[in-house]
Image (spheres, grey):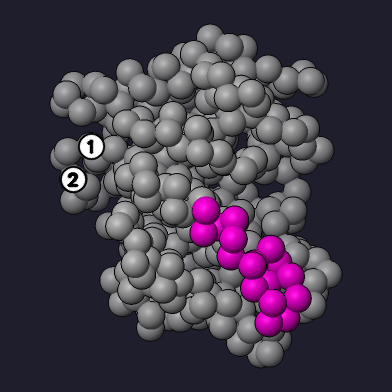
Amino acid sequence: MLWVAVAVGLVVLIAPEVVSARLQQSFFGVNPQVPLSKPDFARMRGTIGSVRLSAVWPQLEPRQGHWDFGELDRLIGESAQQDIRVLLELYGTPPWINPVSADPPSSRAETLAWLGFVRRVVHRYGPDGSFWHGRRRRLPVHSWQIWNEPNFLLFWQPRPEPRHYAELLRLTAHAIRTVDPRARIIAAGVAPVEGGIPPARFLREMYSVRGVKDSFDVAALHPYASSVRGVEYEIQQIRQVMAAAGDSHSPLRLTEIGVASAADSPTAFNKGWRGQARYLSRTFEMLIANRRRWRIAGVDWFSWRDGPPDPHCVFCEFSGLVRANGRPKPALRALRRLVRQAQLGA
């Protein structure tokens, strides 16, 4: 969710792909940074095809053996009511294991506890999940993302370790597939942030772990940049790394991307009300035009609604498609236009 601006181009050759020629509505996704309300979901219908939610272990099991699925049940249920697919991110370590939630499981006991959490969540929300029993509207979770920005110190402590993440990815993917063999495993999105390992280097080291390519179906990137050209550069770098690793066939999902309509501090990511809409339009148009060449599986705008100030992010507070009070911004109208054009085959 943080940023570093990039602005130069790079040309790479990418193998032909098999991304669907028809652009599904699920291509257009969002990330919430604050709890979504029923009116939020109603406003998304017809425009937003997927929502990236988080199953945060410390929130779901704050005390060992004491589970609270109430809020996540509500969010997933509301998504299903509006025919919005869910990409569920699995993240965090609870305080009864480690007071630092961004410190991933490392010991055997911690890892076994993590895998137990993973299986419990998949058993609940997957295709045969207990959550769906007796419900008229069923839209089970098929897409699971493992952790968030492990190349960034804020989300992986005490320091990012690509090989450690690769092992966690391997074990987690196996646990998910034992419950749902057809699950779609998405690797954590990496971002061009300060205080971490650059995305291309992180992925290069991750790919050096034997067998890691079999652990996920989709790679992920958070190509934050202050220009459309910068977004293009970030994607091309990652596709180059994937091709060099013999993984040019795997799709790439942009599980976070965005700029702000305002800011409390000077930043190149503050585009103003209409500038945010222009950036969204030009970025999505570029991504749609290149989606088959780059095998883009979907794009998740960060965020749906403006949130509170974030000491770790200079633009997140005003990055929403709608204001904090729920009123839509020009950026939401721009996205609706893009979705209509996609549905008409434009």
Between 335 and 153, the residue placed more toward the observer is 335
**Image-based side of 22 in relation to 296, left or right:** left
Q: CA distance from mark 1 to mark 2?
A: 7 Å
Q: Residue at x 53, y 9 (%)?
A: 274
Q: Bounds of the magenta span?
A: 57-74
Q: Which residue is mark 1?
A: 23
Label 1, secondary structure: give it. Answer: loop
Give the residue type at disc 2: Ser
The vertical placement of 295 against 263, above or below, is below
The vertical placement of 344 against 304, above or below, is above
Q: Is residue 281 visible?
A: no
Label 2, secondary structure: give it. Answer: loop
Within-10-Å neighbours for mark 1: few <14, some 14–19, many 20+: some
Between 324 and 179, the residue placed more toward the observer is 324
Q: Residue at x 45, y 47 (%)?
A: 78
Instruction: Locate the C terminus by quadrant.
Output: top left
Give the residue type at disc 1: Leu
Q: Are marks 1 and 2 in contact (CB under 8 Å)?
A: yes
Q: Residue at x 38, y 27 (%)?
A: 284
The vertical placement of 100 against 4, above or below, is below
Q: Which residue is mark 2?
A: 20
Position in image of residue 180 (x %, y %): 34, 75
**The quadrant where residue 128 appears:** bottom left
Between 100 and 189, the residue placed more toward the observer is 100
